[in-house]
Image (cartoon, grey):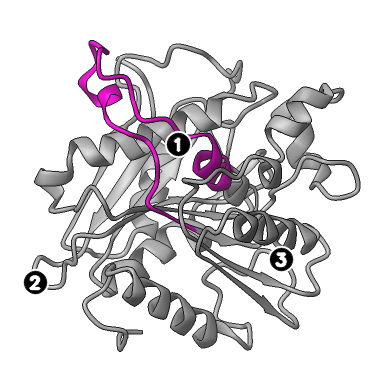
Amino acid sequence: MQRYFSGLIGLLLFSLVSLAQTKQVLPLWPDGAKESNGITEPEEIVNVDRITNISEAAITVQLPEADKATGAAVIICPGGGYAREAISHEGFQFADWLNQQGIAGIVLKYRLPNGHKDIPLADAKRAVQLVRAHAKEWNIDTGKVAIAGFSAGGHLASTLGTHFDSGNPKSADAIERYSNRPNMMLLFYPVISMKNNLCHQGSRERLLGISPTEEQINLFSNELQVKDNTPPTILFLSNDDKTVPPLNSVFFYEALKTKNIPASLNIFPTGGHGWGMRTNITFYNEWRTLLLQWFSQYGYIKNNERQ
């Protein structure tokens, strides 16, 4: 049997998840993934609530109370430069807030790439398929499965939103028969591009290695990969972000509009990078209100009055 949580990590995760009506942890690959990211060290908590050395993927499913449930779900990809994952303020705390709106919050603990570029995307695809496979059990509408990402998690989310497929109807694995296209993208100060002078260098090196080819750079520069059926997208970021250049989001928004994809770009004057669910930013209530309006427009909530 695979070890997908050490005792210490498991205790931390469950202590960080607030009381929801239903929550459970499921491995993405209970029989083992097809490929390894080469990380052999045990998972470790760094800086209080960030997990590193992730070699086995899982989702933590937080379902809202049944009488609040809207049928919508959001799969959440925490950030961390593809070196670690900020599982609390960019993961579980966001899931808690989604539950208050009647939305299922599903936190993805994806395998870190460690130079294996396709591994995080394989986990994101599998997460969407797994949610759709459990849709009836979890009271989720398969047409309302969004993906959210913060920073490098935003790169993973936008990679899925531009590199999805419709599933393999002939697969012996029933989960692989489902489409892995998300119905919506929620991107927070995301890494989008792998291009020089635009990318977050650390994220690029950990995903693509020290000397990626031009083909690899272009393939994972998601502003170049927007298609006619890329899902509607809302972006949040700060103008004074010194970690991930705001032009990442601007270029992605422009690419979406070129393809006539519904999109909303929200740039706040200050806030820096990595704010997630922190309350010490001046626009904390503002971004939540904007997101609720977006959810209301697409039927993810019953009304736009919740906070």
Q: Are marks 1 and 3 in contact (CB under 8 Å)?
A: no
Residue drawn at x 51%, y 25% is: 55
State which region is magenta.
156-185
| Tag 3 residue | 273
Answer whether residue 42 is visible to the viewer in this image. Answer: no
Residue at the image point whose x is 81% and y is 74% from the top: 240
Kindly tell me whether residue 80 is visible in this rendering.
Answer: yes
Residue 256: x percent and y percent? 60, 56
- Frontmost residue, 219 versus 205: 219
Q: From the image, state whether disc 1 or disc 3 is nearer to you.
A: 1
Residue 17 vs residue 198: left or right?
left
Question: Which residue type carries mark 2?
Answer: Asp
How far apart are the two marked residues, 2 and 1, measured between alpha carbons? 29 Å
Circle 2 residue = 67
Residue 293 drawn at (x, y percent): 40, 80
Kindly identify which residue carries mark 1. Answer: 124
What is the quadrant of residue 304 in the picture? Answer: bottom left
Position in image of residue 85 (x %, y %)? 57, 46
**Reading the chain from its start, which is encountered first: label 2 or label 3?**
2
Left or right, 124 with reference to 18? right
Expressed as whole percent of the image width and height from the top left, the position of residue 118 reads: 58, 24
